[in-house]
Amino acid sequence: MFGSIGMPELIIILVIALIIFGPRKLPELGKSLGRSLNEFKKASNDLQNTLEQEIRLEEQKDSAAAAARKAEAEAAPVTPDNAAPSQTVSR
C-alpha cells in the first residue's frame, strides 16, 4: 500500500508523530493532511480531464481538416488546365 514502507516502519512513524505533536493535535493534523490530499487529487483529476478534452478537440480538428482535403481532392475535376503537362515532341 505504501510502497517500500512496511508495517513496523509505519508504526514507528506514527509513534514519533504522537510524541512530537501530542494526542490532541494529531487528529487535527490528520484531518488537514486528508483535506490537502483530497484537494490535490481533485486538482490532478481536473488537469487530466482538461488535457484529455484538449486532445479530443485537436483530433477532431485534424480529422475534419483531413476530410475537407479529401473532399476537395475528390471534387476537383481533371481538366487540361490542371492536368499534368504532356511531353509531346512536334516535328
Image: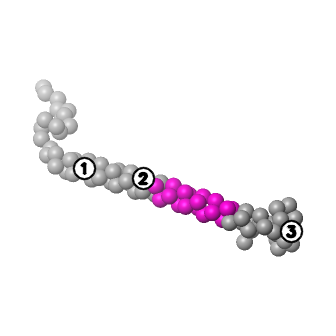
In the picture, the disc for residue 68 is 1
Distance (Cα) linking label 2 and label 1: 21 Å
- Asked whether, in this view, residue 33 is left or right of residue 47, the answer is right
Q: Return the residue nearer the eye: 53 or 80.
A: 53
Residue 54 appears left or right of 71? right
> Residue at image x 29%, y 49%?
65
Q: Name the residue under label 3.
A: 15
Magenta residues, as a range? Answer: 32-50
The residue furthest front is: 24
Q: Name the residue under label 2.
A: 54
36 above or below 9?
A: above
Dot 2: element = helix
Query: Does residue 6 appear to the left or right of 54 in the view shown?
Result: right
Which is more N-terminal, label 3 or label 2?
3
First along the sequence among labels 1 and 3: 3
Residue 9 percent across, percent down from the top left? 85, 68
Q: Earlier in the sequence, mark 2 or mark 1?
A: 2
